[in-house]
Amino acid sequence: MVKAGHHVAVPTTSPSPAGIEIWYTTDGDPTAEPLLMIMGLGAQHLSWDEDLVALLVERGYYVVRYDNRDVGLSTKPVEGDIDALTLLVASLGGAEVDAPYRLTDMAGDAVAVLDALGLASAHVVGASMGGMIAQTLAIEHPERVRSLTSVMSTTGEPDVGQPDPSILGALLGPEPTTRDEAVARGVALAHVIGSPGLVDEAASADKAGRAWDRCAYPQGVGHQLLAIAVSGPRTEGLARITVPTLVVHGDADPLVTVSGGRATAAAIPGAELRIVEGMGHDLPRGHWEDIVDEVCALTARAGALTAAPVPG
């Protein structure tokens, strides 16, 4: 369907029973191999660099991106005066809390995007929280996933993938109230969590500015953090994944430390693990070709398995 708002008509999924509409966009030939890309915490679809998307299109993919709920042009659930931080602390302390939604609901949003495009299944790439959503999608909707690439993500187990304590102060600073503050914060965070010596300040500033102009909604970050916290570990579910899987993680990632990637690969039968030396919690341009090569090899293997005759 097409939804009016934000100065233009935008494509969204049909409303879910909960009233959620997900904004999406596509690049490439619709008859090519579909590749669904899921972004992370508080990040709009544009956090996937346009040049990276173009590279994937050149390599033969029909690339689908979208804004998660509570981000960009997708629905922001009305939650009243919910104190997400207090609920988050309570959840991390072991208390049961009533979260607005869970990762399972966000995986359902991904299914809605596939449905809107008439795609029975797709290769799925998820980064950070997007990796958690992609994992959940593969666990709960295996028929919709042709291959899984989990990037700088983790299993949900509390003893792996936790942030380096040294960066917590920078992460917990006040939310920006102006475009200039948003740009400055975007650049500062890129230096804190990004690949040492490889941060592109101009690109970071541009993305932060465009995200602010498109839709600034800091409340959504708290809701998404709560969704992660209450969803619990996925290790048992990951053991049931049978599609070809690639796990990519930087050894210099201070936000989701590399133990999260190692645990993810260990939990999924047959998963390939790629540790990228010097990469932080980002995707530096210099690593694109190698990572895209590995994604292409993974999807080709998935295609070969699908096409193989059934013995007997």
Image (cartoon, rainbow, N blue to C red):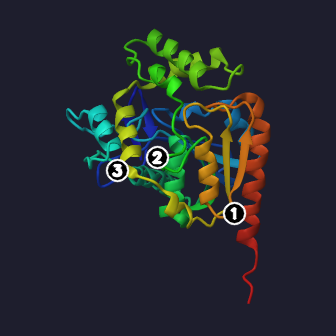
Q: Which amino acid, mark 2? A: Pro
Name the quadrant containing residue 191: top right
Looking at the picture, how far across and down is residue 101, in whole percent?
33, 48
Residues under labels 3 and 1: Cα distance? 37 Å
Which of discs 3 and 1 lies nearer the camera? The answer is: 1
* Mark 2 burial class by Cα count in 10 Å: few <14, some 14-19, many 20+: few
Residue located 68% across and 58% down the image: 271
Residue that label 3 marks: 15
Residue that label 1 marks: 270
Q: Which amino acid, mark 1? A: Gly
Asked whether 66 or 266 is in front, the reply is: 266
- Asked if residue 84 is positioned above or below residue 26 in the image, the reply reads above
Q: For numbered disc 2, what is the local secondary structure?
A: loop
* Residue 249 visible in the picture: yes
Extreme bottom residue here? 312
Residue that label 2 marks: 158
